[in-house]
Image: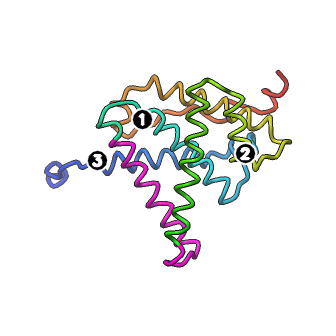
Amino acid sequence: MILRLLRRDDGRETIQRLYGAIVAQSRDPSFYTAYGVPDTIEGRFEMIIVHAFLLFHRLRNEGEEPRALGQRVFDAFCVDMDANLREMGVSDIAVPKRMKKVAEAFYGRVGVYDSALEQADMQALAEGVLRNVFGSDPARQAEASAMAAYITDAAKLLAATPFTTLAKGELPLPAPGDFRPEERSAS
């Protein structure tokens, strides 16, 4: 107990809690059942990108401390992706090339999602989701639109969340089960 009180808080616990919340939300079964996200390595990767993006989108225009927090969570994402590649058997020589592709994929998606949210362009957001999450399958348009609505609502919720909440390692996100593609396509 005393050692814990004397230990300097360097923020690692907060970073792990935030990144853990991103991964936990990304694994919510509703994304793979109601939304039809492929339950594959690629599908899970896309969900992690969506949720990491939501946090980074929230922090991007704030001061130095929020941006530093976002950078540290991004670093945790990179460490996790590196570890996952190695666990999947990617050789030490190939990991840097794969990590470069991970970074390119991440920044490409973030650019599309960020631009669409900034312009409040639900169609562009749904098209980005359709392309990235559903491999441009036109039969998945309803699911892509529902996912775009989820992303928009999550971004609004995070925008209303004080930085102090995020700095404590709390990442409030809406329940994905609240959005059903079949309801969106019927309206």
Asked whether residue 84 is drawn in magenta, I would say yes
Asked if disc 3 and disc 2 are in contact, CB closer than 8 Å, the reply is no
Mark 1 residue crowding within 10 angstroms, few (<14) / some (14–19) / many (20+): some
Mark 3 residue crowding within 10 angstroms, few (<14) / some (14–19) / many (20+): some
- Span shown in magenta: 68-94
Tell me how far mark 3 sits from mark 2, CA to CA: 36 Å
Q: In the rendered view, would you say 132 is above or below 175?
A: below
Q: Secondary structure at mark 3?
A: loop
Camera-side mark, 3 or 1: 1
Q: Quadrant of residue 118?
A: top right
Residue at image location 37% in from the left, 31% down from the top: 165
Residue under pointer 1:
60
Instruction: Name the residue nearer the viewer: 120 or 85.
Output: 120
Residue at image location 53% in from the left, 66% down from the top: 84
Indicate left or right for 65 with 122 as reference.
Answer: left
Q: Amino acid at mark 3?
A: Gly
Q: In the rendered view, would you say 68 is above or below 163?
A: below
Q: Position of residue 156 (x, y in %)?
A: 53, 24
Tell me how far mark 1 sits from mark 2, CA to CA: 24 Å
Q: Amino acid at mark 1?
A: Arg
Residue under pointer 2:
131
Indicate left or right for 95 with 140 as reference.
Answer: left
Q: Amino acid at mark 2?
A: Arg
> Mark number for residue 11?
3
Camera-side mark, 3 or 2: 2
- Precedes in sequence: disc 1 or disc 2: 1
Q: Position of residue 97 (x, y in %)?
A: 53, 68
Mark 2 residue crowding within 10 angstroms, few (<14) / some (14–19) / many (20+): some
Q: Position of residue 185 (x, y in %)?
A: 83, 28
